[in-house]
Amino acid sequence: MGDTSKIYRILAQTEGATITTDTSKNMTASDEKVVAQKDIIAPKGKYQPFVLIPICTEFQWKYGQINFCPRCGKNICESVGGDYLEGVTDRLDFDCPECEANVFVHIISTPEETNDIDIEEEN
């Protein structure tokens, strides 16, 4: 995990529950770690182990970046050729390295992208 700003998925576990949450804005891994420890993992001062999983940039999320296998949930962005840092890969045909399924995914539009189009049409 470098200091590139991305959206992250946070996984934590207590004795009785597993917590999964996603960030909503670009942050560096070090900034996200501070937020996770303060607001999610240890709100009452009791620290729980956790991991940060990089998803993609906020821009990529907004325009439909494909990051995970829809069958098993494996983060496939880097391993199957998705553009991890720059552009948006919203159409992908791949063999998942985890579950070996042959998958075709096409994210036609996202709510955020549609909202941008509606705003542009009003102007």
Image (cartoon, helix red, strand yellow):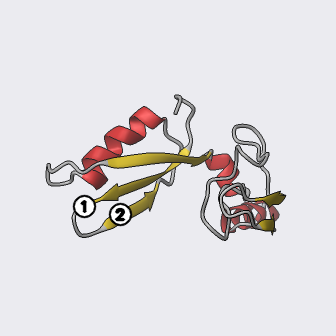
SS category of the residue bearing label 2:
strand
Mark 2 or mark 1: whose residue is earlier in sequence: 1
SS category of the residue bearing label 1:
loop
Which amino acid type is shown beneath numbered disc 1? Answer: Thr
User: Can residue 107 be seen?
Assistant: no
Name the residue furthest top.
Answer: 3
Question: Can you tell which mark lies on residue 14?
Answer: 1
Count neighbours of disc 2 (C-alpha within 10 A) and say few if under 14, some if 14 to 19, many if 20 or more.
few
- The one nearer the camera, 45 or 102, is 102
Q: Is residue 3 left or right of residue 86?
A: left
Quarter of the image holding residue 43? bottom left
Q: Which residue appears at 22% of the width and 51% of the height?
A: 42
**Residue underneath mark 2:** 19
Which percent across, then down, holds residue 76? 68, 52
Question: Compared to 111, does 49 lie above or below?
Answer: above
Name the residue furthest left.
Answer: 45
